[in-house]
Amino acid sequence: YMKYPEANDTVLDSPGYWDQHPGARSLFKRYITMHRQLLASNSPRVVRVSPMGQLCNRLMAISTGFVLALLTQRALLTEGTGFYAPMAALFENPGFAWTSDKGQRSGGSRTITNPISGTWRDTEPLLCGDYNTAYPEPSLMLRTNQYMVPYMYHNPHYHEDLAELFGADVFHPLTRMLFRPIAELRQARDQYVAKHFAGHYVIGLQIRTGHDFTDNFMNEKDFKMYGDCGLQAVPPEQQQNVRYFIATDTQKGRDAAARVFGDRVLFYKDFMVSNNPKGVQQALTDILLLAAAQDRVHTAWSSY
């Protein structure tokens, strides 16, 4: 990537976090330049991500595609519509055009997707192979809801470079670079935090209760277990000052949380199913508010 000059980027150029990650900052700025040059060419090499699932699964798939694009020097492209909300209603672009149709017919293509009958066809090449040899086609289609970056991180062809750039944490700088919530959602988060979190020790509880995740609705005993788990990390002097921010996927779940936590419970706005743009925006705001809590307890095997 040294042959590509570093692009100017308002997020990557900002002080603070990226000052502590100079290698990742430089790589991402050079990638932006390369991406723009690739899309300006007639037949760009691309990784096109077609995510499966909903919001968080979508983000994991795009993160996987981005690392694959970094390692093979391709342009990352992703579907800009679908999933009940267009990308532009949720995120600013990450310094490059990631919803372009360019490269859709750029010669041969190859699809990497979820297991067929439980068999991962691409496990061995992703974990062990040289990607330029394993995936020589100009266009790669990634159709998944999985986060496959650990395969890439532990691949002996790439591990040393990735470990030098990111240490043991690839996910944090990767997603901080890619997923930049639009100003409207950042402002909503900041206003809610200032009004409801200030002066309290906030535990974020992400609790899945919908029929698409569990056949058995978790009862109030289960909700109390989440709360008790969160309390384990609270300093003794803050025990009486705790508030519980609840992100859950049903109104029934909110009702149960309200009965268990009483006047210590916090919700963002009225419940809305995330099958429309406003609902998905509200779900993303829930995630941003979970991140703003001092501690969090998440549902195992779940995103949101």
Image: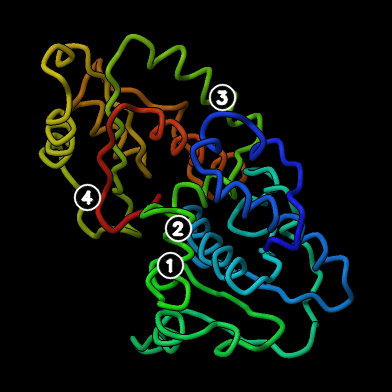
Disc 3 marks which residue?
Answer: 188
**Lower sequence index among marks 4 and 3:** 3
Q: Describe residue 74's horizontal placement relative to residue 164 as left or right.
A: right
Q: How many numbered marks does the figure carry? A: 4
**Lower sequence index among marks 4 and 1:** 1
* Quadrant position of residue 291: top left
Task: Give percent across and percent down for residue 196.
Answer: 40, 15
Colouring: rainbow
Name the secondary structure under disc 4: loop
Cα separation, mark 3 vs mark 1, equals 40 Å
Q: Describe residue 97's horizontal placement relative to residue 40 as left or right.
A: left
Q: Residues within 10 Å of mark 4 (few under 14, many from 20)?
A: some
Disc 2 marks which residue?
Answer: 164
Name the secondary structure under disc 3: helix
Mark 4 and mark 3 in contact? Answer it, CB < 8 Å.
no
Cα separation, mark 4 vs mark 3, equals 30 Å
* Amino acid type at image mark 3: Ala
The residue drawn where x is 43% and y is 65% is: 147
* Amino acid type at image mark 1: Glu
**Lower sequence index among marks 3 and 2:** 2
Which mark is in front, 2 or 4?
A: 2
The residue drawn where x is 47% and y is 72% is: 158
Task: Give percent across and percent down for residue 227.
Answer: 17, 32
Disc 1 marks which residue?
Answer: 160
Name the secondary structure under disc 1: helix
Task: Give percent across and percent down for residue 202.
Answer: 30, 22
Could you tell me which quadrant the N terminus lies in?
bottom right
Q: Which mark is residue 288?
A: none
The residue drawn where x is 38% and y is 67% is: 150
Disc 4 marks which residue?
Answer: 217
In this picture, is 47 found above or below 24? below
Which mark is in front, 4 or 1?
A: 1
